[in-house]
Image (tube, grey):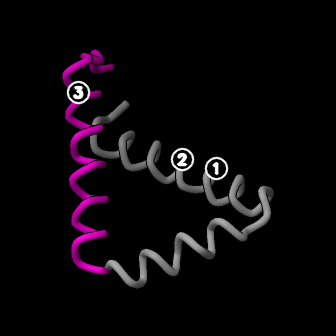
Amino acid sequence: MGSFSFGDFITALGLAFAIEGLVFLAFPDPVRKMMVSVATSPNAQLRIAGFISAIIGIIIIWCVRGL
């Protein structure tokens, strides 16, 4: 099992900001519409989406890092 370093966390955080910024840069109107949709969605639906996203992220990390 690999070791975790704080540098890995900061790198991942920076990558998330960069990808999000590129999405806002490339598609501002659809992102705005999506944000309105998210703001009006029920909490249960947002929790399910968050859970699924977290699981997908963990699976990707596990596949790439072999954790």
Provide residue 22's location: percent of width, then percent of height. Answer: 22, 66
Tag 3 secondary structure: helix
Provide residue 2's location: percent of width, then percent of height. Answer: 27, 20
Hey, what amino acid is under mark 2?
A: Ala
- Quadrant of residue 19 in the image? bottom left
* Cα–Cα span, label 2 and label 1: 5 Å
- Quadrant of residue 46 in the image? bottom right
Q: Quick check: 52 above or below 27?
A: above
Q: Are marks 2 and 1 in contact (CB under 8 Å)?
A: yes
Residue beneath the point at 38% across and 49% down: 60
Of 44 and 58, the residue lying toward us: 44
Hey, what amino acid is under mark 1?
A: Phe
Label 1 sits on residue:
51
Lower sequence index among marks 1 and 3:
3
Residue beneath the point at 64% across and 50% down: 51
- Quadrant of residue 14 in the image? top left
Residue numbers of the magenta segment: 1-27
Badge 2: residue crowd in 10 Å (few <14, some 14–19, many ≥20): few
Lower sequence index among marks 2 and 3:
3
Q: Quick check: 32 above or below 56?
A: below
Residue beneath the point at 55% across and 48% down: 55
* Cα–Cα span, label 1 and label 3: 22 Å
Label 3 sits on residue:
8
Is 18 situated left or right of 60 in this image?
left
Q: For residue 36, which numbered disc appears in the image? A: none
Q: For residue 54, which numbered disc appears in the image? A: 2
Q: Quick check: 56 above or below 66?
A: below
Of 7 and 27, the residue lying toward us: 27
* Cα–Cα span, label 2 and label 3: 18 Å
Magenta span has 57? Answer: no
Hey, what amino acid is under mark 3?
A: Asp
